[in-house]
Amino acid sequence: MRLTFALVGAIALTGVTTAASARDYLSIAGSSTVLPFATIVAEQLGNNPSFKTPVVESGGSSVGKKGVCEGIGTEFIDIGNASSRMKTGELEYCAGNGVDLTEIKVGYDGIVVASSKAAAPLNISKADLGMALTAKVSACSSGVQNYNCTQMIDNPFMKWSDINPSYPDVEIRVYGPPTTSGTRGSFVEMVNEKGYCKKDELMIAALAAAGEKAKACRAMRQDGAFIEAGEQDNLIVQKLQEDPNAFGIFGFSYLDQNSDTLQGAIIDGGAPTFEAIAEGSYSVSRALYFYVKHA
């Protein structure tokens, strides 16, 4: 409800309804993670006689942030939602198109690595999770002898147990969002880059020798260990329900909605729960945003 009140207040303050008056409804698009919340907001607004029910679409955070900034008029969306905050370049793109925005932080969300409850639970460090999924690792990380430790090689880990014998003895197979997704961007920054590459001494040395920065670690594997599954998180949920050895990356709300069949991995000793995300103790958490266009 607080989310609804915040958005209604922003609409009243910015006059976005005037900009949308020619088509008589608000158009909202963006993050698949924010989609369930945006849908609730749309329904609540539709119950108010002052508003028609907004049209809500997904497409990813980049669609929401770019779409709301493309221009003024009925052919453009009125509100973009995102699971990552706008960067300077995105704000400059807005200003260049004459678009003025109000940013509303609507809450916090956790990014989960989920699996079927039919599978053994995964209890993993953020560093090892990043090592499992980043495209390149230090040659010495593979455990193969006589490699130059300052070299980076294609990720050789085929099973979770190759990284740590205590992990499940099954192939690494993780479904996740595409590069247009704010969830993908937040995950690779928090897990691959900051969780693994900026903390693993071997990787730090290999990156330095290659003249690369830790951002290079945001590239995900393309050998089948990580599989892009599009912006529809429900499709990832279906994959996990069909395949007990697979894992999926998406926002906490989808885990909560499917808690009868799915479980979340424990990361750095913390389980994904409402309380842990709200207080910031779950280590893979981020803020969610609405970007409301002024009239």
Image (tube, rainbow, N blue to C red):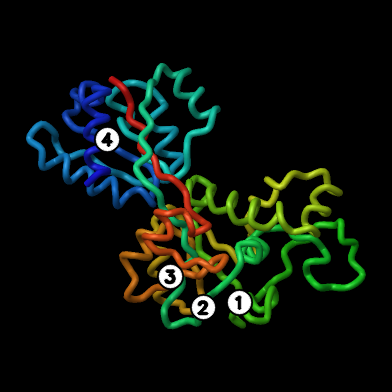
Q: Disc 2 vs disc 4: Cβ atoms closer than 8 Å?
A: no
Residue tagged by mark 1?
171
Amino acid carrying label 3: it is Lys
Q: CA distance from mark 1 to mark 4?
A: 42 Å
User: Quick one: SS at disc 3?
Assistant: helix
> Would you call the spot at circle 3 few (<14 residues within 10 Å), some (14-19), or many (20 or more)?
some
Residue tagged by mark 4?
27
Could one spot residue 238 in this view of the protein?
Answer: yes
> Mark 1 or mark 4: which comes first in sequence?
4
Q: CA distance from mark 1 to mark 3?
A: 15 Å
Residue appearing at x 36%, y 61% in the figure: 254
Residue appearing at x 22%, y 47% in the figure: 1
Residue appearing at x 83%, y 66% in the figure: 140
On the image, the x and y values in percent for residue 63 come to 42, 39
> Mark 1 or mark 2: which comes first in sequence?
1
User: Quick one: SS at disc 1?
Assistant: loop
Nearest to the eye among marks 3 and 2: give it: 2
Residue tagged by mark 3?
239
> Mark 2 or mark 4: which comes first in sequence?
4
> Mark 1 or mark 3: which comes first in sequence?
1
**Quarter of the view holding residue 250:** bottom left
> Mark 4 or mark 3: which comes first in sequence?
4
- Give the label on residue 25, or none: none
> Would you call the spot at circle 1 few (<14 residues within 10 Å), some (14-19), or many (20 or more)?
some
Q: Disc 4 vs disc 3: Cβ atoms closer than 8 Å?
A: no
On the image, the x and y values in percent for residue 205 come to 83, 53
Q: Disc 1 vs disc 2: Cβ atoms closer than 8 Å?
A: yes
